[in-house]
Image: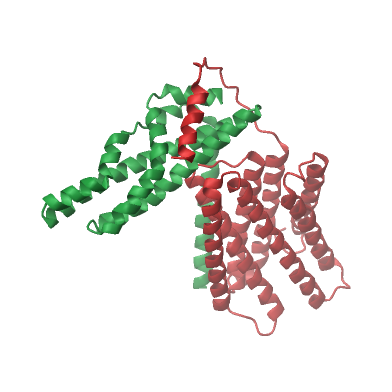
Chain colours: A red, B green
């Protein structure tokens, strides 16, 4: 059951990607692809890429060397898509507010540089396999991508939490799913890349796949199921309250 | 394996934090009312007096250096409390503004967006001002620390006055509802 190429293993690799493709199609049908273009691209391209990697894994005619090349290519494409998605999340949270957009961009660039350096240092400290460099290299690349991705997402959550900025429901779902996936994958790939649990690697693979499946379901929930709108009781309003409020805001802009 | 352990711990901490934010977000959605009551009144005149460089100069001339440092630290601590209160008020205003952002009326939504933007500016300025205050706390004699605080205060002033006018906790509720 918990072995590679078991029924569960096949399901966990294929099903979340089929669900993600379906989610992409549903977003397109509802016109949400224009609202979340990078997530839409991620859903379609990321799922297709994973399905291609799966297909080449199960087709016997594909040699291991070719498979790892396909895996590497997919990994790079997926990494770029994920960073673009992180950028989309950040822009949608901060761009509407000029007062924090500039400082936010400055800070996330700084954090990005620090994370790239940290990931580079971690990669340099990770043991390399001279015989199967393409394999250990892929593990290190996974660790590098997830370290940067998880760091950037954690930073976005920290800053938005500090400023009490609430993400809209779909965007929050995207960010939450991506963050859970990034954190779990960072942990598992760090263990694998550093030679940990050599006898239990299939369990780490299954954990990765199960986590990704859960994240796809989170995206389904937050993107397709509308939130419950709480009815707010009407409050009798005195006149000119809004004008006073707006006048004070003008004083804020031009003190 | 040390590196793997460090990364696993870092990933676990990040995940716990993110899940914590997710849980607090759902709690905020369910307990969104009563925000206005969280706004603290701010005595702007007292704040202005605390950051007045003429007061600083007067105290510097009148008091011995050691005593001046003590008094100045007390004044800076008091200033920090005011700025912290302004920052907390700004956070409440952000939430109130965001609650009104989904209003159907475009004018209302725009006013709410401006409210959020200004409250964010106040929170950002409060953060920078606090950093300067803490720096000045460490070196109360450093002349350069006072001027940036005052400049930060000038930026804060408009926002602080706005918050001062929100001393009546019922007013923001009405405004929020109207938005």
* B160 relative to B17, above or below: above
Q: Residue at x 31, y 33 (%)?
A: B43
Q: Residue at x 26, y 48 (%)?
A: B53
* B133 relative to B115, above or below: below
Q: Residue at x 66, y 52 (%)?
A: A88
A152 and B104: which is toward the camera: B104
Instruction: Residue B15: give x, y in percent of width and height.
Output: 54, 53
Instruction: Residue A49: give x, y in percent of width and height.
Output: 79, 61
A54 and A22: which is toward the camera: A22
Say which quarter of the image contains residue B55. top left
Instruction: Residue A191: give x, y in percent of width and height.
Output: 58, 68
Is A121 situated left or right of A174 in this image?
A: left
Is A141 situated left or right of B85 in this image?
A: right
Residue A7 visible in the displayed image: no
Is A47 situated left or right of B170 in this image?
A: right
Instruction: Residue A245: give x, y in percent of width and height.
Output: 49, 28
């Amino acid at each position: 059951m918990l072995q590679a190429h078991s029924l569960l293993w096949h399901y966990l690799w294929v099903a979340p990607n089929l669900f993600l493709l379906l989610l992409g199609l549903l977003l397109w049908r509802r016109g949400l692809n224009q609202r979340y273009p990078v997530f839409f691209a991620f859903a379609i391209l990321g799922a297709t890429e994973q399905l291609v990697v799966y297909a080449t894994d199960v087709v016997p005619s594909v040699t291991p060397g070719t498979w790892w090349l396909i895996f590497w290519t997919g990994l790079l494409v997926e990494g770029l898509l994920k960073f673009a998605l992180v950028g989309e999340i950040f822009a949608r949270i901060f761009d509407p507010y000029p007062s924090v957009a500039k400082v936010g961009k400055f800070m996330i660039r700084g954090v990005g540089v620090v994370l790239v350096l940290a990931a580079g240092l971690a990669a340099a400290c990770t043991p390399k396999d001279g015989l199967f460099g393409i394999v250990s290299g892929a593990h290190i690349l996974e660790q590098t991508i997830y370290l940067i991705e998880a760091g950037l997402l954690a930073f976005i959550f920290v800053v938005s939490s500090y400023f009490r900025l609430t993400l809209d429901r779909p965007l929050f779902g995207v960010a939450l799913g991506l963050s859970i996936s990034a954190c779990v994958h960072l942990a598992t790939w760090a263990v694998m890349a550093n030679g940990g649990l050599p006898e239990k690697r299939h369990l780490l693979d299954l954990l990765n796949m199960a986590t990704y499946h859960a994240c796809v379901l989170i995206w389904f929930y937050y993107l397709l199921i509308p939130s419950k709108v709480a009815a707010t009781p009407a409050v009798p309003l005195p006149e000119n309250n809004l004008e006073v409020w707006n006048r004070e805001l003008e004083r804020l802009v031009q003190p | 394996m040390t590196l793997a352990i460090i990364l696993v711990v870092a990933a676990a901490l990040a995940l716990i934090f993110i899940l914590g934010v997710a849980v607090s977000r759902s709690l905020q959605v369910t307990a969104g009312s009563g925000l206005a009551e969280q706004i603290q009144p701010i005595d702007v005149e007292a704040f202005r007096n605390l950051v007045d460089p003429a007061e600083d100069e007067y105290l510097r001339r009148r008091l011995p250096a050691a005593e001046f440092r003590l008094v100045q630290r007390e004044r800076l601590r008091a200033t920090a409390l005011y700025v912290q209160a302004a920052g907390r008020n700004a956070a409440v205003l952000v939430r109130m503004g965001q609650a009104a952002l989904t209003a159907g009326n475009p004018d209302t939504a725009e006013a709410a967006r401006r409210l959020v933007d200004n409250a964010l500016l106040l929170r950002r300025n409060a953060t920078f001002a606090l950093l300067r205050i803490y720096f000045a706390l460490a070196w109360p004699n450093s002349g350069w620390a006072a001027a940036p605080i005052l400049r930060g205060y000038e930026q804060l002033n408009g926002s602080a006055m706005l918050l001062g006018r929100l001393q009546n906790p019922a007013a923001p509720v009405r405004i929020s509802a109207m938005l």
